[in-house]
Image: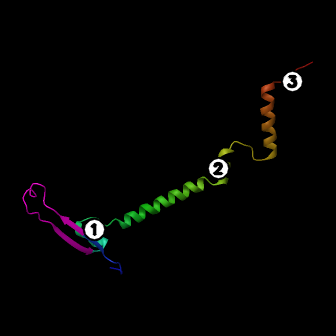
Amino acid sequence: MLGRKPLPLRVVIAPPPWIRAGLTIVKINIDIDCTPHEARAFFGLPYVKPMQDAMMARIEREMLDAVAAMSPDAVMKMWFQSMPENPEQLRETFARFFAQPFGPAPSR
């Protein structure tokens, strides 16, 4: 199958302990050379490669989105979203910030 070397599959069947109580022990070895796909089909296991590929693509997409959200530009925008964007807004913000704690100027 596609030039793949079959994987050897060794099945060892030994009798249960209550049969081993006598002098004769029976041991059977069966060597089966088959590919993983053939072994899955023989044991009735489903072929999950398409589902695994879809899940891996989804995980990769979500990881790339998470990395993009943590780019330096995105992090700076998230941290400083309340900061003013132009110098006039920055001046007004600082003026309001420093004027509030001291109150109005005292009259002499």
| Residue 97: percent from left, percent from top | 77, 33
Identify the image quadrant of the N terminus.
bottom left
- Three-letter amino acid code at disc 3? Ala
- Residue at 22%, 67% (x, y): give it: 11
In space, the residues marked 1 and 3 are separated at their CA atoms by 85 Å
Quadrant assignment, res 94: top right
Pointer 2: what residue? 75
Mark 3 lies on a secondary structure that is loop
Residue 93 is labelled as none
- Residue 7 x/y as whole percent: 31, 73
Nearer to the camera, 21 or 14: 21
Residue 105, disc? 3
- What x and y, as percent, mark residue 13? 17, 64
The circle drawn on residue 40 is: 1
First of labels 1, 2 by sequence position:
1
Q: Residues within 10 Å of mark 1 (few under 14, many from 20)?
A: few
The magenta-colored residue range is 10-33
